[in-house]
Amino acid sequence: MRFLEGDWVIANANGGYSKTVGYVTKVGYSDGHIQIKQVFRVTNNQWEWIKPKVSSYMPIQLVSAVELFNQYQDKTTLIDLALQTKDKKWFEELTGEKQKWHTVEQ
């Protein structure tokens, strides 16, 4: 799968018990690596916010996080995630622009 900047991905998705999730910040390294900013971990269907950090992975180590997000019918977690990552566009999509935008200190 080809990833683009801004795509949400699950890193080291090896069927393990804990998954790290983040978004692509850079593609196109000469060695084929993709840089992502990790923002939370999912363990036993529980989301745990982590201190954001940038890591580099080979594309084969990443899978799309779209299905993970689609599992959550309650948008509250996704809205919190949009606020944590300061993604105003995504926040507005999730809320229908009806709520006031504010940033969360990290």
Image (cartoon, rainbow, N blue to C red):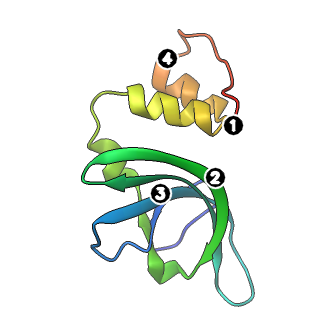
Residue 1 point in image, percent of width and height: 45, 74
Q: Which residue is mark 2?
A: 52
- Which residue is at 38% across, 45% downward? 47
Residues at discs 2 and 4 in contact (Cβ within 8 Å): no
- Which quadrant is home to the C terminus? top right
Residues at discs 1 and 3 in contact (Cβ within 8 Å): no
Q: Which residue is mark 1?
A: 106
Q: Which residue is mark 3?
A: 21
Q: CA distance from mark 1 to mark 2?
A: 9 Å
Q: Residues within 10 Å of mark 1 (few under 14, many from 20)?
A: few
Q: CA distance from mark 1 to mark 3?
A: 17 Å
Whether residue 8 is visible to the viewer of this picture, yes or no, is no
Residue 8 point in image, percent of width and height: 51, 55
User: Left or right: 63 with respect to 14?
Assistant: right
Amino acid at pointer 4: Gly
Amino acid at pointer 3: Val
Q: CA distance from mark 2 to mark 4?
A: 27 Å
Mark number, residue 72: none
Residue 24 point in image, percent of width and height: 61, 61
Element class at badge 3: strand
Q: Which residue is at the front of the view, 61 or 49?
A: 49
Amino acid at pointer 1: Gln
